[in-house]
Image (spheres, rainbow, N blue to C red):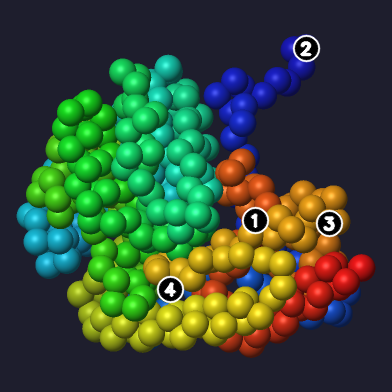
Amino acid sequence: MVGYTVPRRLHGVEAEAAFVVLSAAKKVEATGRRVAHLEIGDASYDTPEHIKEAAIRALKEGKTHYTPTVGIPELRQAIAESVKRDYGVEVDWEKNVVVANGCKQAILASMLSILEEEDEVLYPNPGYPEYEAAARLAGAKPIPYKLTIEDEFRIDADRIAELITPRTKLVVINTPHNPCGSIMREEDVKALADLSDDHGFYILSDEIYRPFLYDGEEHYSPLSVKRSLDRLIIADGFSKRYAMTGWRIGYALIPEELTTTVFKLLNVMTSCPSSISQWAALAALTGPQNPVHEMRKGYEQRRNLAAEMLSEVEGIRFVKAKGAFYMMIDVSKLISKLRMSAEEFVMMLIEKYGVAFLHGTALGSYGEGYIRMSFSASEDHITDGLKKLKQAASDILSS
């Protein structure tokens, strides 16, 4: 009998660490202690009522069967209409819009549709771990471009340009950015679009957090610059915008040449997205948008609270988020004194102080020395958690 060996394409692919940290925090809670949860990017808001009612209606009307692999026409049409409204660009709902089981699946299917072995994928680090994982699963070579606190974690087109080679097939951007809360400047988006035209690589722009911008900042997308989906993929979804993380429904806007391949991949993976989630997503897009605006205002208030409290913590650095609902906190001074890694520091904070963050190395090798906080958590978790971080920092620096 041949023993099991991990397939080569899975080497370096890791499960999303936020859920590992969440599990560790839950074990502490199971002992009766309170833990402030700042580790995972789940909305503390509930899915709006009109969306839940649409799902209930779909259930009662028997809409519980298979749907087309890439989504029901009604939802795909509504997505195309929302793209025209939000970006001022027309896309063909039949040729350019595919619905998936979450933005994560849309990203994976899109990468698998264009990447081959030895292709190179440039992706942000720190960044959402799915980008590197999906590139590895496709057999490509993931190459990180570094985001630094000195540059406010901005994605810089000049830094990307330095890494482009004849094998560069795809460049991934994420704006607003998880985990850094940064946004891309208009000039960098335009410069990246020009680089794509000059070198022929695809851009995958993850824009799942685009509704959440603060201090009057604006969202700049390659779609608004290019005015077409030529060598451009936009990944988006409903999880963050409508507090629908558990509904697992997202989508991608793709060039027409990818449509057949992405269809095949999604069909093999899951046959189709959840029918009930699709009807709920349709109600989300076509119904009142006030809940989205209220969530944005709420997140901005929480960001302000978090930034104010973090400014009182000794021995750390951070950049106030301009978008999304995360901030990276430089704790290198603290962990250097403890002679710990960022991951060990996170576990120590859970076990000793009762507050959960995500270690920066869960978001890429350049995240060492950092922890990520999510301010999507409720204000009481933010207040409690950052008081505990302040106490931990004080204890460490005075020891």
Q: Residue at x 32, y 56 (%)?
A: 184
For disc 2, the marked residue is 1
Q: Are marks 4 and 3 in contact (CB under 8 Å)?
A: no
Residue at the far right: name it: 399
Q: Nearer the viewer, residue 152 or 70?
A: 152
Q: Secondary structure at mark 1?
A: strand
Q: Are marks 2 and 4 in contact (CB under 8 Å)?
A: no
N-term-proximal mark, 4 vs 3: 4
Image-quadrant location for residue 116: top left
Which residue type carries mark 4?
Ala
Residue 243 numbered tag: 4
For the residues labelled 2 and 3, the Cα–Cα distance comes to 50 Å
For disc 1, the marked residue is 370
Is residue 236 visible in the rendered image? The answer is: no
**Viewer-side label of 1, 2:** 1
Q: Few, some or many C-alpha atoms within 10 Å of disc 3 (few <14, some 14-19, many ≥20)?
A: few
Q: Nearer the viewer, residue 171 or 147?
A: 147
Q: Secondary structure at mark 4?
A: loop
